[in-house]
Amino acid sequence: MTYNYEEILLIKTAWYYYIENLTQQKVSELLGISRMRVIRLLEKARTTGVIQFNIRKDSSRRMESEKALADRYTLKDAFIVPDASEPTQAAINANIARAAAMYINDRLENNRFINIGYGDTPSRVLNVLATMAEEPISCISLTGGVNNYLPNMQSNVFNARLYLLPAPLIVSSREMVEAIRGESSVQEIYRMLSPSAFSVIGIGGLNENATIFKGGILNHNEMLFLKRQGAVGDVLSHFLDARGGLVDTDIEEKLISTPLPTLKSLDNVIGVAAGSAKVEAIRAALLGEYLDVLITDEDTAEALLALAE
């Protein structure tokens, strides 16, 4: 397939205007084209069917990158969205969350149970999905840490039922972990994981902007210790080395989270992550084969493909 500049420009224009809600003037400045051209591209997007309720997935360059990601990292699917108009991590996470919610909503059928992991981006996915879903969805938490799963209440619509692990993310001792896992209410949540249609997980980089550090669950010294142990990031707060192996520490022993072997056994595990600070962590999750689907942005996809060469 050949590179089609006009088609990619059309997709980006439609994404920024309809999904990120930028003004036509802002889109023209961002893409370096005139406002009149933006208007013509938006009209073409409407008349050709690119804009329906979702952006049609048919950009040839993006499809090539998605196929390359899937092939090189043994994924069932990959979905790449345009880079966020604002390069902050919060804007990137919001962009990925919108795309993930649309991706899942398109594929939900009779089984409307979804497992959700801990982190900023999965939380955003849950909130967007719960506002766009026409029928109620049921969401099961993959980790402790109740607050991260609660609705943000920015919308009056939250069409989801939550089934949460009634426990913190990290407790005081291994004995406490065993006691909590033995509770019938916790065992019931774990039994609900396997039949779910999708599992949505974030991937955290090893820096102070990661949710687990930013939220004060782990501190700066613990982050430095994890780095010395070879950790590059986390999946469900399990810290991974560069090849995707588990970094075994005292933190792991005190964690209330779905074990990595259980995660691997689940169907349709979707990783939602992007940003330069997360590339090494995303690659570790891919090499560890914890994901079936990756939803990311253009810059991150290019970086992952470069590392795979």
Image: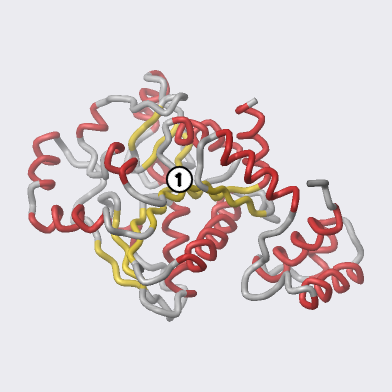
Answer above or below: position of 226 versus 81.
above
Q: Residue at x 65, y 34 (%)?
A: 303
| Mark 1 residue element | loop
In the displayed structure, 94 sits above or below 289; it is: below
**Which amino acid is tagged 1?**
Asp
**Number of numbered discs on residues:** 1
The scheme the figure's colours follow is: secondary structure
Residue, x 57% and y 45% (percent of image)?
274
For disc 1, the marked residue is 292
Residue 96 occupies quadrant: bottom right
For the point 69% across and 71% down, the residue is: 18
Answer few, some or many: residues within 10 Å of disc 1's Cα (few below 14, many 20 plus, some between 14 and 19). Answer: many
- Toward which corner of the image does residue 260 lie, by quadrant? top left
In percent of width and height, residue 76 lies at: 50, 46
Q: Horizontal and vertical percent for residue 226?
A: 37, 25
For the C terminus, the quadrant is top right
Q: Nearer the viewer, residue 133 or 237?
A: 133
Q: x, y percentage for residue 98? A: 55, 62
Which residue occupies 31% across, 43% down? 265
Q: Position of residue 97 (x, y in %)?
A: 52, 58
Q: Is residue 131 left or right of residue 56?
A: left
